[in-house]
Image: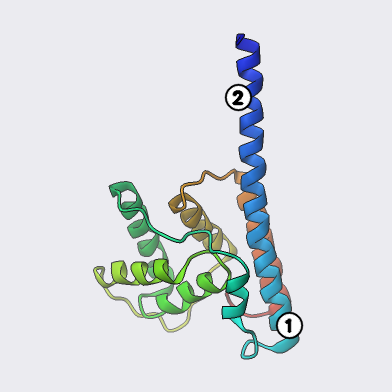
């Protein structure tokens, strides 16, 4: 194989990987859109989040047992608790389960990790779109993927759009 052919194959592989990552991001955005539509039509008490979750599998179904994965998970927990407090962490992680970012098992594992850090209480909390984008980055990395900055921008815009339409903190 010539050097030029190798470069073409590498470029094709990179484009295919990028396309696959973009499709996964768009799938997550579609799940969020479906939930938003249901909330607008039925109200938050009427939405069957469990049924929505059955439609697609979560992005992150397991946290790796290697040092790197556990360290990244702890950094994510520290990031989240600094913003919402340990008292609100279960509610936030439940939201991430509902939108298909993490599985119930991952939520349980993250809550066990949180038991080992300093407990903080926050009465009022709201994550900014940037904070959700950071969370998505943690989810994506823990699932073993890389992510392009343009994909993060798409997610941020989608979260901002949803917050404006629903007029509720996420």
Asked if residue 145 is positioned above or below residue 39 in the image, the reply reads above
State the residue position of label 1. 40
Label 2 environment density (alpha carbons within 10 Å; few <14, some 14–19, many ≥20): few
Residue in view at x 60 percent, y 17 percent: 6
Asked if residue 21 is positioned above or below residue 1 in the image, the reply reads below
Foreground pick, 61 / 168: 61
Asked if residue 52 is positioned above or below residue 141 in the image, the reply reads below
Residue in view at x 59 percent, y 77 percent: 169
- Between circles 2 and 1, the one closer to the viewer is 2
Left or right: 152 as drawn, with respect to 76: right
Q: Quadrant of residue 11?
A: top right
Q: Give the mark nearest the N terminus, 2 or 1.
A: 2
Disc marking residue 170 = none
Residue in view at x 61 percent, y 39 percent: 17
Left or right: 64 as drawn, with respect to 21: left
Q: CA distance from mark 2 to mark 1?
A: 45 Å
Quadrant in which the C terminus is drawn: bottom right
Colour pattern: rainbow
Extreme bottom residue here?
45
Residue 61: give x, y in percent of width and height: 45, 61
Q: What element does badge 2 sit on?
A: helix
State the residue position of label 2. 10
Left or right: 127 as drawn, with respect to 156: left
Residue 82: give x, y in percent of width and height: 38, 67
Quadrant in which the N terminus is drawn: top right
Residue in view at x 41 percent, y 75 percent: 89
Q: What element does badge 1 sit on?
A: helix
Q: What is the count of numbered marks?
A: 2
Residue 77: give x, y in percent of width and height: 37, 64
């Amino acid at each position: 194989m010539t050097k030029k052919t190798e470069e073409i194959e590498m470029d094709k592989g990179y484009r295919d990987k990028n396309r696959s990552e973009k499709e996964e991001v768009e799938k997550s955005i579609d799940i969020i859109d479906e939930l938003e539509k249901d909330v607008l039509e039925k109200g938050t008490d009427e939405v069957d989040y469990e049924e929505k979750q059955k439609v697609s599998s979560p992005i992150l179904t397991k946290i790796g047992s290697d040092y790197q994965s556990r360290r990244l998970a702890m950094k994510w927990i520290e990031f989240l608790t600094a913003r919402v407090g340990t008292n609100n962490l279960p509610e936030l992680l439940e939201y991430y389960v509902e939108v298909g970012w993490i599985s119930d098992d991952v939520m349980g594992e993250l809550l066990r990790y949180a038991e080992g850090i300093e407990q903080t209480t926050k009465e009022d909390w709201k994550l900014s779109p940037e904070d959700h984008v950071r969370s998505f980055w943690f989810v994506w990395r823990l699932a073993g993927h890389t992510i392009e900055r343009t994909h993060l921008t798409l997610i941020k815009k989608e979260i901002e759009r949803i917050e404006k339409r629903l007029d509720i903190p996420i």
